[in-house]
Amino acid sequence: MNFTRNDNKIILIDGGLGTTLHEYGLAVFDDPLWSGKALVKEQELLAKVHRDFVQAKCDVILTATYQVTVDNLMNYHHLSNEQAEEIIYNSVKIARNVIDEEKAKCYVAASIGPYGAALSDGSEFNGWYTDSMTIEQFKDWHRPRLAVLARAQPDFIAFETIPSKKEAEALVELLKEFPNVKGWLSFNCQDTKTTAHGEPIEEAAASVCLKSPDQIIAVGVNCVHPETVVPLIKQMNKMDRDFIAYPNAGVTWDPETMTFKNEGRLIAPFIRSYIDAGIKYIGGCCNVNPNQIRTIRDIIDSYSSYL
């Protein structure tokens, strides 16, 4: 993978892992591990979803660790610390094995969701807990999972759906403890100007870039409405970093019913505008399945040939 900004190649990320598992028959919406349920109970189905995204010609697939921590594996599945770490470690191996079997030129990003994701109540979409935690508390909470995933040697770490500047700062500070690991950081936002917690998005992104000039290769947004991507990225246009965006399909999560409020829409019509906005890493989040990723692949390939 070329991490330099001199390469104009658009990098295609996969789609929504949890929602695709749900589409394929695994009930994850009401599960505290979300897509991580498949790591414990349905590894073959997880491999199938990874395979379908790889066959859709994406460049990066994410592990099923967004909502998985050592503690919640121990609590919800009564595993030992060692067993929980092994499951997290194997998330990278499962993704890598699929890529090897497909003989694909594809990379593995180890997913790390925010503290709020592990609460399993939609807190990543508002970050209400941010003000009650310190930077050090965030680092201590995230460290065990990051340590295991770093040891598994993914191509990079995906800090995703981060709702606040403070948690983002904690994550990039923590990443320095693993100096050979690179990653991206994408914020969740509920409007076109601020993080989900309410800080100006340009200030949050600038802080990430300042605190991690070498390890964070891209900043941006994910699991946002597709219409908000370009306005949000434009707020960051002074950043000396590549941009990343992988929106959901225009859906809104309802933590009361553990379902999405609406059926959503295709994100393919937005892809050209994302490329025009200078976004290098493009993909999908919730309710974006392998078929949609294949369509986006075709759009990127055809559109890029004219640039």
Image (cartoon, helix red, strand yellow):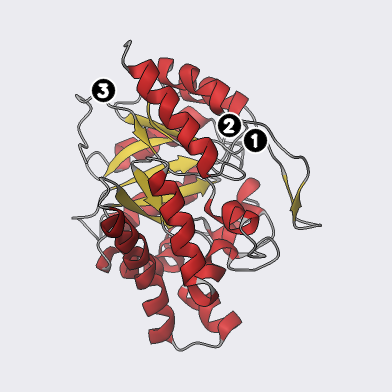
Judge by depth and name the residue closer to the eye, 294 or 276: 294
Which of discs 1 and 2 lies nearer the camera? The answer is: 1
**Circle on res. 77:** none
Q: On the picture, is 215 further left or further right than 165?
A: left
Pointer 1: what residue? Answer: 190
Q: SS of the residue at dot 2? A: loop
Q: CA distance from mark 2 to mark 3?
A: 28 Å
Pointer 2: what residue? Answer: 194
Contact, mark 3 vs mark 1 (Cβ under 8 Å): no
Contact, mark 1 vs mark 2 (Cβ under 8 Å): yes
Pointer 3: what residue? Answer: 8
Residue at far top of view: 306
Judge by depth and name the residue closer to the eye, 246 or 239: 246
Which of discs 3 and 1 lies nearer the camera? The answer is: 3
Amino acid type at circle 3 is Asn
User: Where does the C terminus fall, quadrant-wise?
Assistant: top left
Amino acid type at circle 1 is Gln
Residue 34 placement: quadrant = bottom right
Looking at the image, which residue is at 67% across and 65% down? Answer: 27
